[in-house]
Image (tube, rainbow, N blue to C red):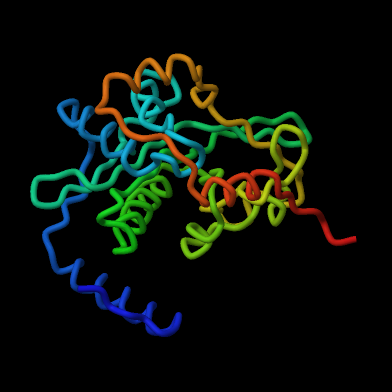
Amino acid sequence: MKIRVSNKKEQTEIEKIHKVAFEKTDMNIRLERKDDYTQVEELTREAFWNLYFPGCNEHYLCHILRGHKDFISELDYVVELDGKIVASIMYTHSYLINNDEETVQTVSFGPLCVHPDYQRKGIGSALIEKTKSLVANMGVPAIIIFGDPRNYCKHGFKNGIDYQVSNMDGKYPLGLLVLELQPGFFGNKKWKIKQSDAFNLDQDEANKFDKKFKEKEKKYEYSQELFKMNIRAYLKHDS
């Protein structure tokens, strides 16, 4: 049965009801184990398939991240529900470089994914909040990611321009998001963020890896158009 929703307010209320009902279930947030690897890669593939372009490569990223020097295993968490893994988050080291040529280690997360059947139920938010507190206790000054602001501003992320944090080209992409964990850390200095080179994927290798999985149709989705807009959008300082 489909529920007809007449306006955005009603849609929000329905989502709240679903979220409250879901939170009463047995959700287990735990570290990823070796015997989870295949299930996490399958989950990631399902969550990202055709989202940004026809197909995806995030499941291959999961595969290679675990063996990379920048991977942070103690922040590699999954959500298990009724014995099934329905969400995953992975972290890597990233690096801030300021205008005095000082380098400060930060962290970044991604891929972060929730199975399509379990999205908009607060699972992704639970993973972010769980790991965010762990990062803060590690003494890391900030979490810096590239993502859709609509998904992360509710967790306290702001655009890099608000902290004078740019990409390595000195620009402020719309999706460059910063969560300051130590208030006042950024000060008046200018910073550039350098992500782990683990994200420099070999697409040919990603395609080979994908052949290990059940074949899925690669096709156009409108979300790909939104993604192209987002990655070409930049912020500028007020004149």
For the point 19% across and 26% down, the residue is: 34
Q: Where does the N terminus fall, quadrant-wise?
A: bottom left
Q: Residue furthest right?
A: 239
Above/below status of 90 relative to 135: above
For the point 49% across and 23% down, the residue is: 198
Q: Residue furthest left?
A: 82
Q: How many marks?
A: 0
Position of 31 compared to 98: left or right? left
In the foreground, 182 or 108: 108
Position of 168 compared to 224: left or right? right
In the foreground, 113 or 78: 113
Above/below status of 148 relative to 30: below
For the point 50% across and 21% down, the residue is: 201
Q: Position of residue 7 (x, y in %)?
A: 44, 83
Q: Where does the C terminus fall, quadrant-wise?
A: bottom right
Position of 87 compared to 187: left or right? left
Above/below status of 55 relative to 151: above
For the point 35% across and 45% down, the residue is: 113
In the foreground, 209 or 81: 209
Q: Position of residue 193 (x, y in %)?
A: 64, 36
Above/below status of 30 relative to 14: above
Q: Position of residue 141 (x, y in %)?
A: 53, 45
* Whether residue 142 is visible: no
* Whether residue 17 is visible: yes
Q: Position of residue 176 (x, y in %)?
A: 62, 47
